[in-house]
Structure formats: C-alpha cells, structure tokens
Image: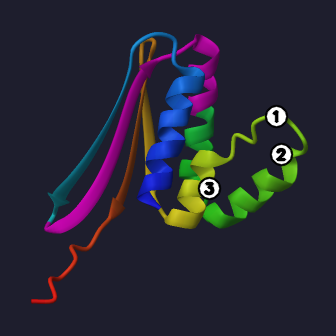
Amino acid sequence: MLVIAVQELAENLVKYSKGEASLSFDLCLEQGQGVAKICTQNSASEEHLRQASEFFSRIGSAADATSLYDEMVAASGDREGSRLGLIRLRAEAGLVLSCTVDRERLSIVATCPVQPKVSAE
C-alpha cells in the first residue's frame, strides 16, 4: 500500500502544484516503532489550500474513516477525478494523514507503522 500512497501523493503534486514541489519517503524510528513517512510540499492556489484544509479537517475529525470513505464514494457521482485518493489511503491502508498550510505552501505527511522483515538465516 505504500507504493500506492506515494503514487497518489505524487499525482496530487502534479495536479495541484503551482510551481515548486517535493516528495520524500523516509523509514524511521518513532518511540521505538518503525514508521514509514511520506512527505510532500508544494505551492498551491488559495482555493486549493482552502479545500485541502477543509478536507484534512474532515478526515481528521471522522470517528470512522471507512464510513467517511463510503459516504464520499456515494457522493462522488460521475465527475471527472474522484478526489477519493487520500481518504482511501486513510480508510483502506490506515495511514495517518496530516496537512499544514504556511502562506502559499501545502505540506502533507502520511505515516504508518512498519515491521522489519526477519531474515530466514
């Protein structure tokens, strides 16, 4: 699911960036737990920044991400571009998503716990 998360976040950078954009992927330890962390930063229009803030507020306050995803799928209709990628990552992959807006820059962080593979040796 991490590959899909990177693809979704990269797609969003291409669609919504106006100018400079970056994507990073890190494996790190946080409180002794392995964590995969995908971070994006980009400049964006005022309208997109507002929509992103509202969306992240909505998914952050949802008690049940799967129910919210189902609700958003039902409401998506036949429009071009479902805009369901991020909530899908939250609902199906359990990624923790956050965003910050600083002037014209949007930063998104997606994290999930990972377990190292144990060698068969």
Task: Give the spatial CA distance, label 1 vs label 3.
Answer: 17 Å
Residue that appears at 86% across and 36% down: 79
Above/below status of 90 relative to 53 = below
Q: Is 47 covered by the magenta stretch?
A: yes
Q: Residue furthest front?
A: 121
Q: Nearer the viewer, mark 1 or mark 3?
A: 1
Residue 121 drawn at (x, y percent): 9, 89
Secondary structure at badge 2 equals helix
Callout 1: SS: loop
Q: Nearer the viewer, residue 76 or 6?
A: 6
* Disc 1 target residue: 80
The mark nearer the N terminus, 2 or 3, is: 2
The picture places residue 65, in percent across and down from the top left corner, at: 61, 61
Q: Amino acid at mark 1?
A: Glu
Residue 76, disc: 2
- Which label lies toward us, 2 or 1? 1
Give the residues drawn in magenta, as a range. 32-53
Whole-angstrom CA distance, mark 2 to mark 1, is 9 Å
> Sequence order check: which comes first, mark 1 or mark 3?
1
Residue 27 falls left or right of residue 43: left
Q: Position of residue 59 (x, y in %)?
A: 59, 49
The amino acid type, in three-letter code, at marker 2 is: Ser
Relative side of 62 to 118, left or right: right
**What residue is pinned by disc 3?**
88
Query: Residue at image x 17%, y 82%?
Result: 118
Mark 3 surroundings: few (<14), some (14-19) or many (≥20) residues within 10 A = many
Q: Nearer the viewer, residue 3 or 27?
A: 3
Quarter of the image where one finds residue 76: top right
Most extreme residue toward the bottom is 121
